[in-house]
Structure formats: structure tokens, C-alpha cells
Amino acid sequence: MSQTYTSRGTETHKGLALLVLGISQLMIILDATIVNVALNHIAIDFGVFDETGAVDFAQIQWIVTGYALTFGGVLLLGGKLADRLGRRRIFMAGLVLFGFASLLGGFANSLGVLIAARALQGIGGAMLAPAALSLLTVVFEEGKERDRAFGVWAGISAGGAAIGLILGGLLTEKLDDVLVLGGNPVEGWRWVFFVNVPIALFALWGTLRFVPESKDENAKGFDVIGAVLITAGLAALVYGLANANDPLVATGTKIAFIGGAAVLIAAFFVWEGVIKQPLLPLRLFKFRNLTGSNIGGLFVGAGLFSSFLYLVFWMQQINGWEPLKSGFAFLPFTVGIIIGAAFSSVMIGRLGPRPLVTIGPFIAGTGMLMLGLFLEPDSSYLGLVLPAQLVISIGMGVTFPALVSGAVSGVPQENAGIASALLNAAQQVGGAVGVALLTAISIGRTNSLLTANPPVPTPEMMAAAAAAPDPAAATALAMQQAAFPAIVDGWGAALTVGAVLIYLAGIIMGSIVRAKPGAMPKMAMA
């Protein structure tokens, strides 16, 4: 990586360019995990609780879905903007927007402002990700040089998730109230947003210094209307699902939003069929491997994303774990992903992606089902949560490389980039919709149980409350603890449905994908 290239007449180290682009990827990957560990503290500081005193998932889940919706909805547009207007230019614009949104999130004084900041982060990430990957292919020549760069890129993606878990816990726990601004202590969770600002500034400086500009001279137009239609439609769908205490009961608001979502999403596909430069060329769906992989990716995202939310709150709200301990407790998930992905990358060349995208979701779904059926407030981490995490993560590790390989198999090389981006978008969109759906299922199940059997604190809980310095607050806490079994039972119902969604992903991909054995496509490695 010590070779140089010439940019604007200046000889520059390729390794430094890779460092800058890798830092941007690290920031995006970090953001996917660093916030999860801080969610419980965010809920406490903003008072996001339901009538039982537990965290109100219908509201707090927007911190996750707000990011996933805009990232998935704008990702294809971000790639087209980069090709048309200049990859470095859009990359830098994405850095500025991501850094600004992180600063806004760190200073947010309400949940609404924080959700808006997360949505802006998603847009910034959707500009950064495709531009960075395109710049990587510009800086490094095809062959061993580019393969090594992709290897570093993949390593950053794998390691970034683990770093995010630990860093999120460390910042939230150890920096809580350490700094005082304007006479008010700064809550630790705010640092998970502030940390992005210096990273973005450094990457911005490095881009100006080390990264060349490039664009596709043949690129024409960009479909802003399509991006608005699909993002608005998905947001309406998620809002309709997230605000339904029981997904099986129809309400006027729910029908209006879900109906509006159907109209907007249908309008998107009609628009894509008539516009000359579509955001999503519908002709791509004639490739069955791409279609099967994207449907599968949608179901995988829908089933998988919510598991992180429930486990974070099981650790922190139910069992009182500190954020740093929670971060370390999630590390086995990253290890399992790496193990499964290493196995899958080797077996793709021998078996092809079809067996792997069938077996991988079956393994992962079984781990999810373990949690759905057996998770209790007092479950053992070593006896249940750790084994389930490993089973889920190994299954997902087996699935992901094969999923991407299937998506680009048979697609012309000139469309490989958009095929990979489409799969990424499908997983993000599936995750956002899945979190909303499973949250509604969880809330509906919990409310049903609490209505049938109102929580009654045990004598031990009431005795502890009477002896506490603040009996009223302690009594409220006792009532909340009495509701824990119903809350966790609701999460179990959601996790069980999540397992079914992941199983369906495997069935769908096993039925549709027909890609032959072969080496892992280079675009897929990114």
C-alpha cells in the first residue's frame, strides 16, 4: 500500500487515501452498534416510559429505524449523485452532513430532535458509503492491489462493529456527568454522537489532501422524486406499524398510514418504470438471483435488527447491567459473524451460494427461536443468551457473503455496483420495517398479559419499598419489576416472529437463487 498516484499534480500515498476512506467506513459501522448500547440511558434521560414504567419501545425504536429508513431509502440516490456530481464532492458532503447530524444528536434536548438527527445521519451515511467504495476502485488498480484494499475494508467492517459495542459502553458509562457545559453535566450517552465529529473533521481534511476527484462522464440525471416516494412510503409504513399496540387490530390512524404507504410505494414503482434515469432500474429484477437475494435480505433484516434492541434492554433495564458490561456481552456476536463468514467465503467456491443462503438463515433462526421461547427476566447469560448469540451470529456469518454473492451472480459487471447497493438498502429497509412490526407484536402481547393479570409486587418487593428513603419511588419501581415477566414475554413473542422471518428468508432464497459455484465477486466483498 506504499505506492503513489498523482492527484492534481501532487504525488500521494495510496495507503493514506485508504486510511481516510477506511475511517469513513469505520464511522458508519461504529454508528450501527455504538448507539444500541446507549439506548437505555437515552430512554431514562428523556423519560421515554409507558404506563408500566418500562421503556416505551414504540417511541425509542425510532432512534434505530429513523437511521435505517433514510440510509436505505437514500442509498441508491447517494450512489447516483456521486457518479454524476463527483465522488469526492459527494463523499465530503456526506462527511459534513454526518458530522453536523452527530453534533445535533449530541446536543438534542428532546427525543424528537434526536430522531431527526439520526435521520440526517442516515442521509449522510447514504452519501458516504457508495462514494467511498467508488473512490476505492479509482485509487487502487484492479487485481491484487485492489483485492488487498478490499481486504482492509472488510476487516474495518468486521472490527468496527466490535469497537462500537465497547466504545458505546465506555463512553456512556465512564463519561457520564464528567464534563459540565453551561452549568449542566453532560450525560454519557451524548458522547456516542460527539465522537463522530472529530472523526468526520479528520476524514474531511484527509479527503482534501489525499483523495482524488472522479465521476462517471456517462452518468445522466438522478431520481430525487423516486427517493422521496420510497422513503416517504416506508416511513409511513413504519409509523403505522410502530403506533399500533396490537398489529392485528385495525385503527383509523393505522389504516391511514399503512394505506398511504401502499400508495406511495406503488407510485414509486410506477415512476421507476417511466423515468429515463430511474433510481432503481426495474430491469434488474429479471435476474432471479438478484431478486431472490434481495427478498431474502429484506426478511433477514426484518428478523434480525430487533434482537439487539431486546437484548440491550434485557441486560440493562431488566438486569441492571452497566453499558460497558453490555458491550462486552455482545462481543461474541461479532466473533460468530467472523467465523461464519470465513467458512462461507471458502464454501461459496465449492457449493455456490444457494446451500449457504438456505442453511445460514436456518441456523440463525434457530438461535433467535431459542431466545423467543426461553428468555425470562432471570435467564442465565451463559446458559441461554451467549449460546443463542453464537448460533444467530454464525448463521448470519454464513448467510451474508453468500447473500451478496447471489445478488451479483449473473448481473452484468456494469450493474454490479447497483446490485450490491440494492441489497444493502433492502436489508436496512427490512430492518426498519421489522423493528416496527415486532415492536407492535411485543407491545400487544405485553398489554394483553397485563390486562388479564395486572402486576402485583411480591411481599419482598413491597418490604424493600417501605424501607427505602423514597417509598413512593421505590413502590413505583416495585410495580415495574412486577411487570417484567409480561414485558419479557412480549419480547419473546417478537423474537419468535423474528425467527420465523429469518426462516422464511432461507426458504425464499433456497427456492429462487440458482447461482453456480464460483469465487466471491469483488464488488460483493465491499
Image (spheres, rainbow, N blue to C red):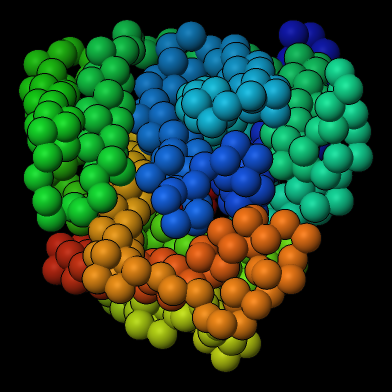
In screen coordinates, is 10 left or right of 504?
A: right
Quadrant of the image occupied by residue 362: bottom left
At 64% across and 55% down in the image, what residue appears? 473
Q: Quadrant of the N terminus?
A: top right
Quadrant of the image occupied by residue 465: bottom right
In screen coordinates, is 445 left or right of 56?
A: left
For this rendering, which residue is in front, 167 or 129? 167
x, y (%) of residue 229?
23, 20
Q: Is residue 417 visible?
A: no
Q: Is residue 106 above or below residue 54?
A: above
Q: Is residue 418 visible?
A: yes
At 50% across and 56% down in the image, what residue appears? 54
x, y (%) of residue 70?
41, 29
For this rendering, which residue is in front, 91 or 235? 235
- Count of picture labels: 0
Q: Is residue 166 above or below residue 338?
A: above
x, y (%) of residue 410?
25, 51
At 59% across and 86% down in the image, what residue appears? 380
Given the current orientation, which residue lies at the most extreme bottom position? 383
